[in-house]
Amino acid sequence: MSDMMKGNEAIAEAAVRAGVKFYAGYPITPSSEIMEYLSWRLPETGGSFVQAESELAGINMVIGAAASGVRALTASSGPGISLKQEGVSTLSDEGLSAVVITQVRYGNGLGTLLSAQCDYNRETRGGGHGDYRCLVFAPSSVQEFVDLMRPAYELAEKYRVVSVMMGEATLGQMMEPVTLPEFVEPERTPWALNGHYTFKKIGIFQRDSMQEAVELVEKYNTIRENEQRWADEGIEDADYVFVSYGVPGRSTLGAVRELRAQGEKVGIIRPITVWPFPEKAFHKINPEVKGIITVEANATGQLVDDAALYTKKALKERNIPAYALTYVFGTPTIRNIKKDYYEIKSGNKKEVY
């Protein structure tokens, strides 16, 4: 049975039901309701909650909890996630699993409180220093966010990586009907510290970095092959294929369906994982496609780089124009997407690639 829930509260409850036992973080709009909810909910279920003195402290506490073998969580947005990047690098270097939620808001520096998708490049490229990648999920609804919470932990533990849940301010603040999952009680991760020095500590000068690099490439190639997630519609015969994730992916789907009803041959790929990027979807595109169009809630166009790259990989013999429809502040409307599509079709908008 569905209940009407605010996004951040539903996400927090889904984390509890996915077996989270530790949360540490620092409040920041538009993610603060996650930690507010967990401040009382986690103790009810035998977990621990800490409002840290800073984002830096919070992510380092998550490192300790992950090293102890429990499912650990932190959440933030914009500059808060930037501050956590060193800790994410450390988690990745040590092969520890955790989940980081970011409810993206628009802007440079401290930015604004408005919903956006301007952090795509940071999240999909690792974010911090080092040669690593995070699994990055981009849900388009509160229900999908809830449904992805358990797989985010299971895959993080399977591959010993960090899972990033890249939402948007809109997803955290909107209310939607949600069906909550059952509770799971995960076992402590087998590599956890146990007080008996079961796993010998290896210093930086004893590590075989060359061998580690080989193993990392193998791991990330395995993730790329097996963990791509997406939804698509109408791409096999489309003249133009839209690519859009998150909440803008919802309005883009609406635009595609209305355009189809008007006789336009259009389709959509909605990435659910943005790393690994769903390149397999691009092999399903009509070989005679005339253009790829990204719909993004940012100013500069970031998703278009990957969309153009994987179109080229899939359709090597052709140079397919790639266009970016960028919309600052909030979710683009079906009306505006349709209007700009006709601008592209008429030749009034220049391609990015």
Image (cartoon, rainbow, N blue to C red):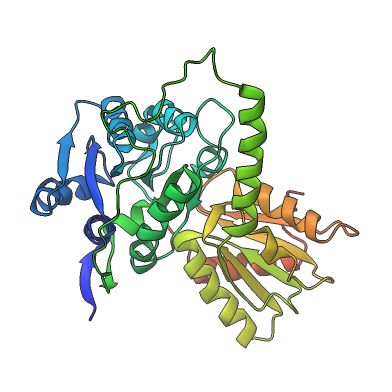
* Rendering coords of residue 327 (x, y %): 52, 53
Q: Of 198 and 47, which appears nearest the observer?
A: 198
Determine the residue positioned at 47% across, 34% down.
Answer: 92
Residue 205, image quadrant: top right
Relative to 109, 12 lies left or right: left
The relative height of residue 238 versus residue 310 in the rendered view (above or below) is: below
Q: Of 228 and 343, which appears nearest the observer?
A: 228
* Rendering coords of residue 281 (x, y %): 67, 66
The relative height of residue 195 versus residue 66 in the rendered view (above or below) is: above
* Rendering coords of residue 80 (x, y %): 34, 33
Q: Of 3 and 162, which appears nearest the observer?
A: 162
The relative height of residue 275 versus residue 234 in the rendered view (above or below) is: above
* Rendering coords of residue 206 (x, y %): 54, 15
Relative to 303, 52 lies left or right: left
Q: Could one spot residue 289 in this view of the protein?
A: yes
Relative to 68, 153 lies left or right: right
Residue 14, image quadrant: bottom left
Q: Image quadrant for the N terminus? A: bottom left
Residue 78, image quadrant: top left
Determine the residue positioned at 12% across, 49% down.
Answer: 46
